[in-house]
């Protein structure tokens, strides 16, 4: 089936995308799945497999183009309107999240502001930190990168010296600590770096994967398949939040 360069009409762009997707840039697994079984048999098998795979893709393209040919102008207009409406809803939702302070990693001035910040946001990640705890800066760097990527989640930081009541109420005893909230309730916590491999130089994706495991963000990567966790007995560099505000650093 050929499509002339002078083709016009609302379905031309859809036709081109369909052809480009299946012929110019076919799914990488489509040809390989069909070629690999015969690859070991030699070049003859490889050539036959490529021919069969190409014919099957062409058949799929023809079926999709035939479906497009059967769409009338009214149906195409409805599809365009549905797409525009979805884009409008997404933009409106993004603006609402921005109004609530999503999209950036921000400091909470005091524990009094904590409850107001969490109210109205379904998912919240809050880093309880202290300036004198060096490893808190590592969390800061990663959270600053993740906040713009996950707009539906609010990312905050709170100095424990300004939040003695919250630290006691939420049992924040070790720094650095991330408390993860869903529907205004603590659903999980990340204490130190054990869950990211127990090392200081863990990649941002490691923390992204961990937050995804807790359900406070949506993570679709494959990092979890290669995670090797260190024993949780080694907590070197962590600091305990003492009742008098003093630090007790673990060995």
Image (cartoon, rainbow, N blue to C red):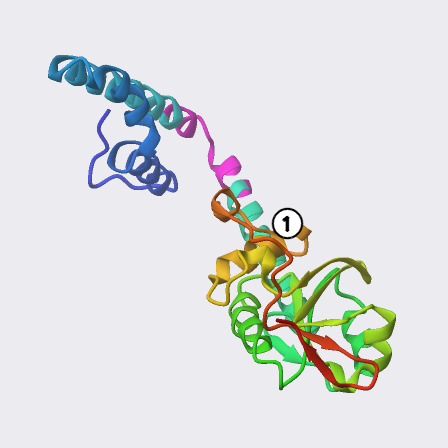
Relative to 98, say whether 189 is above or below: above
Q: Is residue 214 visible?
A: yes
Residue, x 33% and y 27% (percent of image)?
30
Q: Where on the picture, by quarter, is residue 42?
A: top left
- Span of residues in magenta: 66-78
Q: The residue tagged with tag 1: helix, strand or loop?
A: helix
Identify which residue is drawn at 22% across, 28% down: 2
- Is residue 73 part of the magenta span, yes or no? yes
**Residue 110 visible (yes or no):** no
Residue 139, above or below 89: below
Q: Position of residue 113 (x, y in %)?
A: 80, 81
Label 1 sits on residue: 213
**Closer to us: 121 or 204:** 204
- The quadrant of the rendering that contains the C terminus is bottom right
In depth, the one of 200 and 47 nearer the eye is 200
- Residue nearest the observer in this picture, 114 or 54: 114
State how many labels appear. 1
Q: Is residue 204 left or right of residue 88?
A: left
- Please tell me whether the stretch drawn in magenta is mainly helix, strand or loop: helix
Is residue 250 part of the magenta span, yes or no? no
Q: Residue 196 appears at what percent x and percent y?
A: 55, 57
Q: Is residue 101 above or below residue 180?
A: below
173 left or right, relative to 217: right
Residue drawn at x 86%, y 74% as measured from the top left: 168
Q: Residue visible at 75% across and 85% down?
A: 246
Q: Position of residue 8 (x, y in %)?
A: 30, 41
* Crowd tier of the residue under label 1, counting other residues whose Cα lies within 10 Å: few below 14, some 14–19, many 20 or above: some
Where 62 falls versus 13 (above or below)? Answer: above
- In the rendered image, residue 137, in percent from the top left (x then y), is placed at 56, 78
Screen quadrant of the N terminus = top left
Q: Residue furthest front?
A: 251
């Amino acid at each position: 089936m050929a499509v002339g360069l002078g083709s016009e009409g609302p379905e031309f762009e859809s036709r081109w995308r369909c052809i480009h997707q299946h012929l110019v840039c076919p799914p990488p697994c489509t040809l390989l799945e069909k070629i690999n079984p015969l690859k070991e048999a030699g070049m003859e098998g490889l050539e036959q497999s490529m021919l069969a795979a190409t014919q099957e893709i062409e058949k799929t393209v023809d079926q999709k183009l035939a479906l497009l040919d059967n769409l009338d102008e009214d149906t195409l207009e409805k599809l365009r309107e549905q797409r525009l409406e979805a884009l409008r809803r997404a933009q409106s939702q993004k603006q609402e999240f921005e109004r609530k302070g999503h999209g950036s990693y921000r400091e909470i001035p005091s524990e009094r502001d904590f409850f107001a910040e969490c109210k109205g946001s379904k998912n919240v990640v809050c880093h309880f930190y202290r300036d004198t705890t060096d490893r808190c800066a590592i969390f800061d760097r990663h959270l600053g990168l993740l906040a713009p990527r996950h707009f539906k989640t609010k990312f905050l930081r709170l100095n424990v010296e300004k939040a003695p009541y919250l630290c006691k109420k939420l049992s924040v005893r070790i720094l650095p600590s991330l408390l993860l909230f869903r529907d205004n309730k603590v659903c999980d916590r990340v204490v130190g770096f054990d869950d990211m491999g127990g090392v200081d130089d863990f990649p941002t994706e490691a923390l992204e994967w961990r937050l995804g495991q807790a359900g406070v963000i949506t993570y679709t990567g494959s990092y979890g398949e290669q995670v090797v966790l260190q024993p949780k007995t080694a907590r070197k560099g962590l600091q305990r939040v003492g009742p008098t505000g003093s630090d007790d650093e673990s060995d």
